[in-house]
């Protein structure tokens, strides 16, 4: 009687090992990115992407996790940038990393002050109160020359450039590693905050602040904490935007358009998720490049720059409407659903 040979069972895949390998590969790519990309990509794409991700993360903590609507992201970024400039100008012995932390604390204090109305009002009225911060600081930093050291162009720039404990960070690689280090550190801090009691309090307030108060959540303190932490991160992002990306900045660099851009990032990327800030920032950074490449190839370069910019704005508007209606949790949710459906198809083939 002949023996029946059954096919050998496939060895099970170790998901933990694959995840660790993927993380290691991602870290290697991040560290070596400056040596693989051109200076244009570092200066014009990667560095602003990291800074916008950080700004989106700061706003997402406030709006996505704590449920407090805000249109003042640009104002808090502005405070961080001008505070860093003043500290470096008037306290030159202060190291840049410490100046960034102090500037973030100043922005956090400002956010705390403008967050006080959130204890009484919500929704549209809260948006209006944060919008007041935007207009107030635009007026303040233009009205008094002390803030920009009397510069005839009303711009700010670090006279010594970017230097960290004597190390030069004025070249593309230095700016990249400076930005990457700060973004990674603040992202880790945000993860720890979200996974702790503070993050749980924020999410309880977001879902229903009345019920949160009933179960013992300190609603007043938690809302102010959300504004302070969010503004702290936004302030540091503003300083990086001014000095690590633009080199010099003015009030217009942090106008209402910037606040809308940060809001679009978290709506498209996904409210209430850390990775949503990165996905939204990647989308906002790469979409203009993709549209420019597409129109250049379709119309052989005969496209007016103003028309292309208006098309980009129209596409952003349509996408925001689509995400709000079809997928309010943004790209993070959309990609998560596809990954989950793919895993189900592998487990249960049709």
Image: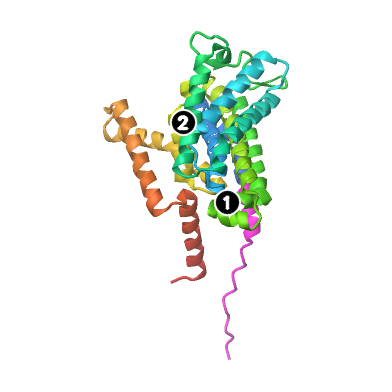
Disc ID at residue 242: none
**Residue 95: which quarter of the image?**
top right
Q: Name the residue under label 1.
A: 205
Q: Does the magenta stretch include residue 206?
A: no
Q: Mark 2 points at which residue?
A: 258
For the stretch drawn in magenta, the main secondary structure is loop
Count neighbours of disc 2 (C-alpha within 10 A) and say few if under 14, some if 14 to 19, many if 20 or more.
some
**Residue 100: which quarter of the image?**
top right
- The number of callouts visible is 2
Q: In this view, does 305 lie to the left or right of 60?
A: left
| Residue at point 52%, 24% (across, down) | 137
Describe the element under mark 2 as helix, strand or loop.
helix
Percent position of residue 97, x then y: 69, 26
The region drawn magenta spans 1-23
Describe the element under mark 1 as helix, strand or loop.
helix
Count neighbours of disc 1 (C-alpha within 10 A) and say few if under 14, some if 14 to 19, many if 20 or more.
many
Q: In this view, does 288 lie to the left or right of 177?
A: left
Percent position of residue 8, x then y: 60, 73
* Residue situated furthest bottom in the rendering: 1
Q: In which quarter of the image is the C terminus?
A: bottom left
- As drawn, 329 above or below 30: below
Q: Is residue 215 left or right of residue 129?
A: right
Which of 233/332 is in front? Answer: 233
Would residue 250 be visible to someone looking at this image? no
Marks 1, 2: nearer the viewer: 1
| Residue at point 66%, 38% (across, down) | 185
- As drawn, 314 above or below 323: above
Give how far apart the Cα atoms at labels 1 and 2 are.
27 Å
Would residue 159 be visible to someone looking at this image? yes
Percent position of residue 121, x then y: 51, 43
| Residue at point 54%, 35% (across, down) | 55
* Residue situated furthest front in the rendering: 120
């Amino acid at each position: 009687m002949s023996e029946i040979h059954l096919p050998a069972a496939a060895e099970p895949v170790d998901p933990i090992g694959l995840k660790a390998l993927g993380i290691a590969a991602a870290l290697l790519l991040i560290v070596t990115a400056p040596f693989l990309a051109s200076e244009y990509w570092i200066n014009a794409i990667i560095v602003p992407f990291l800074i916008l991700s950080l700004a989106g993360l700061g706003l997402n903590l406030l709006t996505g996790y704590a449920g407090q609507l805000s249109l003042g992201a640009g104002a808090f970024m502005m405070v961080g940038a001008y505070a860093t400039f003043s500290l470096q100008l008037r306290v030159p012995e202060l190291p840049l990393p410490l100046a960034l932390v102090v500037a973030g604390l100043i922005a956090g204090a400002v956010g705390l002050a403008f967050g006080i109305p959130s204890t009484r009002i919500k929704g549209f009225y809260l948006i209006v109160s944060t919008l007041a911060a935007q207009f107030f600081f635009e007026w303040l930093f233009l009205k008094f020359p002390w803030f920009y050291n009397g510069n005839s162009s009303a711009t700010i720039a670090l006279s010594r450039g970017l230097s960290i404990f004597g190390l030069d960070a004025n070249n593309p690689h230095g700016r990249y590693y400076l930005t990457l280090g700060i973004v990674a550190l603040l992202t880790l801090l945000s993860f720890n905050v979200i996974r702790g009691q503070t993050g749980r309090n924020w999410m309880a307030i977001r879902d229903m602040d009345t019920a949160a108060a009933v179960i013992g959540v300190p609603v007043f303190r938690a809302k102010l904490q959300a504004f302070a932490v969010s503004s702290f991160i936004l302030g540091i992002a503003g300083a990086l935007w001014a000095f690590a990306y633009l080199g010099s900045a003015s009030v217009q660099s942090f106008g209402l358009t910037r606040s809308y851009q940060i809001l679009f990032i978290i709506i498209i990327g996904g409210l209430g998720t850390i990775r949503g800030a990165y996905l939204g920032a990647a989308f906002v950074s790469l979409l203009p490049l993709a549209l420019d490449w597409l129109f250049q190839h379709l119309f052989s370069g005969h496209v007016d720059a103003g028309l292309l910019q208006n098309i980009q704005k129209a596409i952003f508007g349509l996408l925001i409407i689509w995400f709000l209606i079809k997928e309010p949790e943004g790209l993070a949710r959309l990609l998560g659903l596809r990954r989950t459906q793919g895993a189900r198809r592998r487990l249960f083939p049709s």
